[in-house]
Image (spheres, rainbow, N blue to C red):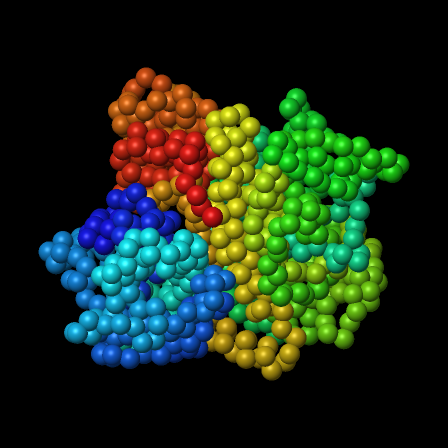
Amino acid sequence: MELHEVGSLLEPAPLPLETGWERLASGALHVAVRTDLHGCTGEMLEWWFRWRCTTREYVWWHPVDHVSSTWQGTLAPDTHIGSEHVVREFFSGLPDQDLVIQFRDPAEFFEPDAYGKARESGAVTGAVVGRLGLTHEPPRLADGRVLGGRLLHIARDTGWGAALRSHFFVGLDLPDQGLSPEEVAAQTPEEFGRALLQHAYDEFTFLSRFLPALFVAEHRDTRPRGTRGERAVRRGGGGRLRAGGQAAGDPAGPPRPRRRRRRPAGGRLPAPRAVTHDSEFARVLQSVGLAPDTIPEVTEPYDDRYVWRNGEGRTLVEVDWTGHGESGWFNTYFFHQPSLEDALDRVVAGLPTVRVLRGQEAVALDQDDDGVTLTLRDTAGATRPLRAGWVVGADGANSRVRRWAGLDWQDEGYFHDWLVVDVRPQPHLRFPHVAEQTCDVARPATMVPGGPGRRRWEFMRLPHETREQLDRTESAWELLASFGLGPADAELERHSVYTFQAGWATRWRAGRVLLAGDAAHLMPPFAGQGLGAGVRDAANLAWKLSAVLRGVAGDELLDGYGTERLPHVQTFVRFSVELGQVICISDPAEAAARDARMTAAWDAGMAPPAPPRPALGPGAHTGPAGGTLSRQGRVRVGGGPATLLDDVLGGPGVLLARDAGALGSVDAAPLADLGIRLAALGGAAPGVLTVDDVEGSYAGWFDQLGVDVVLVRPDGWLYGAGDDAAALADGLLAAVRSPAPVG
């Protein structure tokens, strides 16, 4: 997209480049970033820029990259236009940069009539555009306009928040200074484009977490209650937060290396670890024949609230975990991981393509252009080589595979020790089926269901305690006694002190070696997403690796595995740490300040910012909807029963249209090679399965997106949405066969 083509941003239809970067003919760099601002509106976005944040709030906006903020120019209270933001910031690991952002009238970028119509129709609800100078004293035209680059932030309100398109044109004015395209490109390297993309995505994701509450707070005395800004903050209803299945009680943090556990030679570890999963996780279980409603002895829905209380028992906040998620299952479940592993083991045992080697330890790894050689050592100490085309290191937080492959780790510096206790109360005990977080300075604690017939407690280690003092059976019973539990009426299944940590591998692929699960990322358990993140890794990687192994795709497709997953998981890691910073307080004064702040907000009826719902990072998707989680609803085929669509199709992959006629020109065979079928909500066409949308969930989804066709990848994430089914299909096939560089 050239600057004179930015008028296309006024239309909600998908653009050829929604997230990525490209080199323009002039040598300038065009960077595009799509960010979903859940709970926000275009009005909030414009207000944020005329509110003129100080350095303190500027750091809120990006706690890692932002350094300083001042303002100059025309500082009118009712508009950001004419003001200049003078900042210093980092760009995703690059050296810090001085910038001047000069905010301009949209008429400088758009044809006035077209812009006016877009605002009237709601296609655009917020616009922040300007000129970008790459020093604090940038060159200027005679009328004061800054020379350097351009930026545009264009927002459109949706039912869930604001869809934000950010476009940057870096080095745009350099050709006018006599530089050739090659010289312009040298001054605007693609490394900067990648860093700017990541930075912009991160900063607006951070902003979306606090902007709705800040906007309502700043307008509470001047705006009537019940306006859209307030409803965006309150969208869970009754002042309570709808979390969409982000649960607690998932101890993703491993034991410290000096107390490394070894898996028994014969199989899995019997002790429970994770205890909660969400709707998306349930959909993955469904895909392997273990739908939650078929394994009630393993997992049970939690259709209730997650209550946070202080040490006096006063409510700080209630998180709403009720209802179903877009994946077609309950938002929250509590489950028994060893029982789930047994069920998965039975599934794997029935697969002729899978060989399981137990009692083996990988002690060395070597790779070449054709494959990987692992050296295995058995329990008797004998070693042998094992040759494979690819190796996925899912070997935990202390991953040897990660170290052997030379993949770096970003440590977020978060460490807290917690005692995790799992019990089976006697049947005569009736505990309330509640998930509760006790933010008590005397002992922060968590109490949640632990799967059918089980309960879990987690207790934070206090500063005066050692790990060894806390990790004793006697200590566990002493702490449980205050909840009415003792050895006579409950079985203590296990207790263990875990160090909750936060961090991620900066790259997830090195040649023919890939990472997944805790080897790729760690987070505290407070958002309940540790194990879920690993399951998302597996789903994302599986269809891509399958395509590569079958020759349907080149191995470049696997580069998009890490670039898609890393920004997504970083969001949950940081969110989990933020929750932990609220919970893990042992200083009385700090806890009192937290309690006063949260109880005041609760009493005022204000909910905290919603948990993140990030899209995927750059990869095999396109358009505003691309890289978001797809929807699953119930359908009926012929006169049959209402059934979840994945079960009808044999998996999530589908090119789905309102009318079968829209799919008539699509070649189904190459899509079928990827596990994608053709389906429609009405009409008839050869090779297209017509289904009855019995609950209206798909029609509503199409209306929300403003499209007639969606293309869902085999992992349940959207490739894209639009009205041209053939273009979507061709786009995905091109992304698979000849993927564009993503990092």
Furthest residue toward bottom: 589
Residue 483 vs residue 282, the one in the foreground: 282
User: Taking 97 as reference, is 351 above or below it?
Assistant: above
At 57% from the left and 69% from the top, the residue drawn is 582
Residue 554 vs residue 528, the one in the foreground: 554
Furthest residue toward left: 113
Q: Say if residue 226 shows up in the picture.
A: no
User: Taking 681 as reference, is 147 above or below it?
Assistant: below
Q: Say if residue 663 shows up in the picture.
A: yes
User: Taking 493 as reference, is 657 above or below it?
Assistant: above
User: Taking 507 as reference, is 473 above or below it?
Assistant: below
Q: How many labels does the image show?
A: 0
Residue 194 position, x and y percent, is: 43, 54
Dividing the picture into quadrants, the one containing residue 380 is top right
Residue 241 position, x and y percent, is: 46, 60
Furthest residue toward top: 686
- Answer left or right for 220 relative to 383: left
- Answer left or right for 297 relative to 562: right
- Answer left or right for 307 relative to 9: right
Residue 573 position, x and y percent, is: 55, 58
Residue 517 position, x and y percent, is: 62, 46
At 59% from the left and 40% from the top, the residue drawn is 511
Residue 29 vs residue 482, the one in the foreground: 29
At 36% from the left and 50% from the top, the residue drawn is 21
Furthest residue toward right: 380
At 70% from the left and 54% from the top, the residue drawn is 254
